[in-house]
Image (tube, helix red, strand yellow):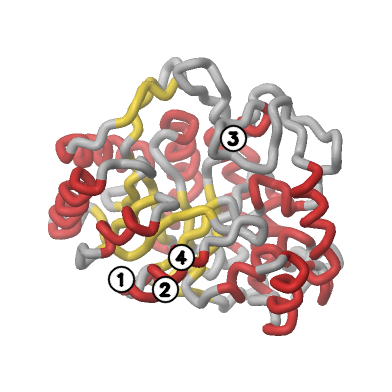
Amino acid sequence: METTNGTIAAGTHVPYTRVLGRSGIEVSGLGFGCWAIGGPWQGPDGSPFGWGKVDDEESVRAVRRALDLGVTFFDTADVYGTGHSERVLGRALGRRRADVVVATKWGNRFDEESKVLTGGDDSPAYVRRALTASLARLGTDYVDLYQLHLSDADPERAALLRDACEDLVREGLIRAYAWSTDDPGRAAVFAEGPHCAAVQHRCNILQDAPDMLVLCEKSELASINRSPLAMGLLTGKYVPGSTLASGDIRSAPPSWLSGFAAGGGADPHWLARVEAVRSVLTSRRRTLAQGALAWLWARSPRTVPIPGFRTVAQAEENAGALEFGPLAEEELAEIGRVLGF
């Protein structure tokens, strides 16, 4: 049952599920991305890589609320908060670990004490060391989906990492693996592995990824969608002139982060595109964010969006999208017409 603000009432069963590619691993149609709950961390030059300050107790409550609302897929990375996101997620899941599918990532090196990213490591030897550390932080003895976090790694080197992941599958330390990259050619390298289940890539109503979706269909991979809400632009919170706190990555966006300018202001052109489709996305009493997630489900039967969260309220709103399911065909077509797809 849906409440008037688009969230799901307590105790509601959410049946909407999807499968992680050819692995057969079933997950809720919506996953939760755990980047934001990692708290502040930074690049070598001091630029913010987190989403600002967090309340760990609220993060734990939000994860557990998501569990109660039927969310069974949580995506994190060892580098988020330089280990802090994994620790918070592991604590929040506790004895319910077996009820969920946990995805994490490796490839970045960092210093946990100073909370600084120190570089990348694409060596096969580092895969096992990174996984061992992630298992300890998560408080588990296996990871369901292990993902390479170096989006532009050399394909030949990546083939060695794929083979290393196959070894980890055989040992029971991971169930499946994936590459987090926006390059279909690179994703195809991992797709050659028997236990590759997915590719994690950027996809949202403002940044479609048709070539990657074709690859996912062809290779029987799940399409795990990071930035499904365009780093917050599809939540409706931002207007021209909006700014963000200095510890938020969007306040000093790196080159790959579109839609925000230095100083944290949202791009007026992007906001205008959001407004152009607002009425379609918010039809049938959906919130704007719920409509954006519903677009992804309608875009492909393989998509699993993973919006971020920091509060119980955000967890409830995001999980509320599961009650609606995908946009109707005519709604999807109307958005395509308005945005010129």
The 10 Å Cα crowd at callout 3, few under 14, some 14 to 19, many 20 or more, is: some
The disc, 2 or 4, on the residue closer to the chain's N-terminal end is: 2
| Residue located at (69% from left, 63% from top) | 292
The disc, 1 or 4, on the residue closer to the chain's N-terminal end is: 1
What kind of residue is marked 4?
Answer: Asp
The disc, 3 or 2, on the residue closer to the chain's N-terminal end is: 2
| Residue located at (79% from left, 49% from top) | 271
Residue that label 4 marks: 211
Picture coordinates of residue 238 (x, y %)? 81, 43
What kind of residue is marked 2?
Answer: Val
* Residue 327 in the image: above or below residue 183: below
Residue that label 3 marks: 56
What kind of residue is marked 3?
Answer: Asp
Q: Quadrant of residue 259?
A: top right
* Residue 71 in the image: above or below residue 88: below
Picture coordinates of residue 115 (x, y %)? 46, 21
Residue that label 1 marks: 23
The 10 Å Cα crowd at callout 4, few under 14, some 14 to 19, many 20 or more, is: few
Element assignment for label 3 = helix
Please name which of the two marks, 3 or 2, marks the residue nearer to the observer.
2
Residue that label 2 marks: 19
Q: Are marks 1 and 2 in contact (CB under 8 Å)?
A: yes
| Residue located at (21% from left, 53% from top) | 162
The 10 Å Cα crowd at callout 1, few under 14, some 14 to 19, many 20 or more, is: some
Between marks 1 and 3, how big is the CA–CA gap? 33 Å
Element assignment for label 1 = helix
Is 216 displayed left or right of 33 in the figure?
left
